[in-house]
Image: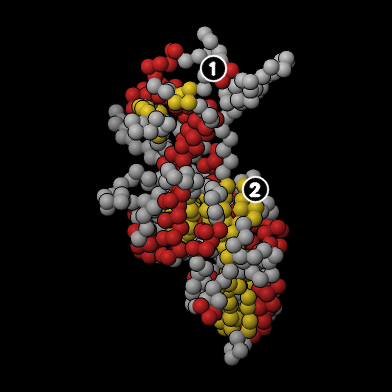
Amino acid sequence: MEISAGIYNQIPAALRVPGVYIEFDDRLAGNSAFQGRLLVMGQRLATGERNALELDRVTNAEQAERFYGRGSMLAEMLRHSLNAQPYLETWALPLDDVDEGSGGVKSTGKIALAGSASAAGAMVLYLAGYRVRIGVAVGDDGTAIAQALVDAINADTRLPVTATVNGVETSEVDLECRWAGETGNDIDIRFAALGEDRIAGVTPTITEMTGGASNPDLVDAIAALGPEQYNWIACPYTDTANLTALKDELDDRFGPMRQIGGRAFAAFRGTHGETGTFGGNHNSPHLTVMGTGKAISPTWLWCAVNAAVAGQALAIDPARPLQTLQLPLILGPKEADRFTDTERNLLLYDGIATFKVANDGTVSIERQVTTFQETDSGVPSDSYLDINVAETLERIRYDQRARILQRFPRHKLAEDADADNFGAGQPIVTPNVAKAELLSLYRDFLSRGWAQDYEGYAESLDAAIDTENPGRLNVIDSPKLVGQYRIHAMQTQFRK
């Protein structure tokens, strides 16, 4: 069969200089190399080096503190996410507080201390899961203990709060979040959270953190992302305006004209009823919200660690379920505050992801559902219920695009009828050539355990040149995704 000079990419056809000219073509050699990226969004402090909305890749906690300020929301989110998955490529997007003139308010709380110590010991306070310990001597009263707590709290600059002795009642400690916004309201305050001894004779009364208002607006943050793909996004905000903006952006990114989709991870603190209501108000295949209940760790750390752990696992295998994966350094609710099996089952129908707490306190993912609950027509649907569906589709599309772009970068397009008449090596694609490539790739998907039913896929696959645009190939396929082994139901019919 004739081989024409037109098949070469670099060797010109008009060449008379003698020599041996050999070019390399890597179309058949390479495979697509997927490397997902995690984006962590959060508020910075003025002590950080980086300005708001400046994207940076971050590799360690010290760098995060230098960039965004020690004790900032963002620095601590990065510290926890990098601890959970240090090899996941992680980017950070710092945000500024909403200023007071525009409605930004820092949350506040209080600890009142009554009585005096009848025995010496250590008093252990947990603030958003961070441990603060002071020594208490026999006879120490509320005023002495309050001052000691203030000194200890302010000495730990990683804490999300600062403390002062109340100006009227010297036995009271006033707490204020380091940043403005609703997230500060999720700071948990409790003594002896992990079963430590309490100080006899001293009775603390806690006023929970409240009053925080006005989260940063994510509209500018979304614009700052540009055309880059971030596969997993840790979002500390759960107000309706921000989540709506983020969901709309992720829907658009997932679409065929951008193809840079990603999933956002958030966390919601509240009662079972509040959590279910929150989930029912959202509907997106690209948003997953962990219902933390009355957890000790704050929501911004939950979403950061959840995103890192899930992201790393999904990068390895998007079709494999996330159940049992541990969330390091996250402290869940005490046993009495945990949602029951019945409550968690209801939350899963409300689009809320769930977790479990082991006897040793280790927190792990139970089921990572998205908030998707119905189609655009309002029909209840579970098509995108679990995060694995969108993740697997994204990876299949990624590999399909990569294969087509790599194999046929500068090819011509023709009908199958003349395929036998084209010269050997001619860079020509026909519908059958494209179908063969996609079928070969589908076998790879089966090998990886992403898809199943090769025969059904082959039957569904069709390709044709557009009747009005001879440079366009139209393709339809129907991959069948694998499921996830989550429930084992069995009836044992015993005999005697």
Three-letter residue code for mark 2: Pro
User: Along the horizontal axis of the image, is 449 left or right of 459?
Assistant: right
Where residue 460 appears, as percent x and y from the top left, is 34, 27
User: Along the horizontal axis of the image, is 356 left or right of 284?
Assistant: right
Three-letter residue code for mark 1: Gly
Depth order, front residue of 87/203: 87
Separation of marks 2 and 1 at Cα, in angstroms = 46 Å
Q: Quarter holding the C terminus?
A: top left
Mark 2, residues whose alpha carbon is within 10 Å: few (<14), some, or many (≥20)? Answer: some
Where residue 207 appears, as percent x and y from the top left, is 51, 78
Q: Tag 1's secondary structure?
A: loop
User: Along the horizontal axis of the image, is 166 left or right of 248?
Assistant: right
Look at mark 2 in the image and give the residue it sits on: 86
Q: Residue at x 62, y 57 (%)?
A: 55
Q: Which mark is residue 425?
A: 1
Q: Residue at x 54, y 54 (%)?
A: 226
Q: Tag 2's secondary structure?
A: loop
